[in-house]
Image (spheres, rainbow, N blue to C red):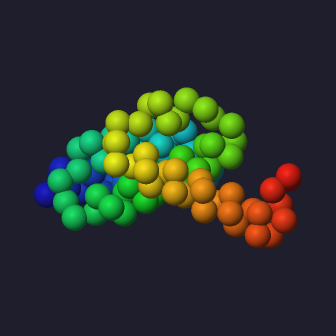
């Protein structure tokens, strides 16, 4: 039971880091969690990681995509970026 509690604490810390906008630390925490996870929440973690990557890209952190170890996540990230830019065009914020 201790290992499961430790994993949950790490996951909570990854979420806290995201909320505190410490995206690089949160990114590393989620990478580690996904690598070591063995449960039914893989999709949720990948979604959270995608959101972190989108925030890092907004901040101009360019080395994030190259450091991904989850190939199927790359397609999700591209879709999220495309959706984000479509939204910006829709609300006329493309040049901001």
Q: Where is residue 46 in the image (x, y as percent from the top left)?
A: 38, 55
The residue at the point 81 percent across, 56 percent down is: 94
Q: Identify which residue, 40 or 70, lies in the foreground.
A: 70
The quadrant of the picture occupied by the N terminus is bottom left
The residue at the point 22 percent across, 64 percent down is: 40
Total residue callouts: 0
Q: Identify which residue, 91 or 56, lies in the foreground.
A: 91
Task: Report if residue 63 is visible in the image.
Answer: yes
- Residue sitting farthest toward the bottom: 91
Describe residue 1's horizontal placement relative to residue 33 as left or right: left
Q: Position of residue 21 (x, y in %)?
A: 62, 50
Q: Position of residue 66 (x, y in %)?
A: 47, 30
The residue at the point 18 percent across, 53 percent down is: 38
In the picture, residue 36 is in which quadrant?
A: top left
Q: Where is residue 79 in the image (x, y as percent from the top left)?
A: 52, 57
- Residue sitting farthest toward the left: 1
Task: Report if residue 12 is visible in the image.
Answer: no
């Amino acid at each position: 039971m201790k290992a499961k509690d430790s994993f949950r604490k790490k996951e909570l810390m990854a979420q806290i880091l995201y909320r505190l906008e410490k995206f690089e630390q949160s990114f590393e925490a989620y990478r580690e969690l996904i690598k070591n996870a063995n449960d039914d929440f893989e999709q949720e973690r990948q979604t959270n990681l995608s959101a972190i990557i989108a925030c890092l890209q907004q901040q101009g952190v360019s080395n994030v995509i190259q450091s991904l170890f989850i190939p199927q996540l790359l397609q999700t990230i591209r879709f999220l970026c495309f959706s984000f830019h479509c939204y910006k065009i829709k609300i006329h914020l493309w040049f901001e």
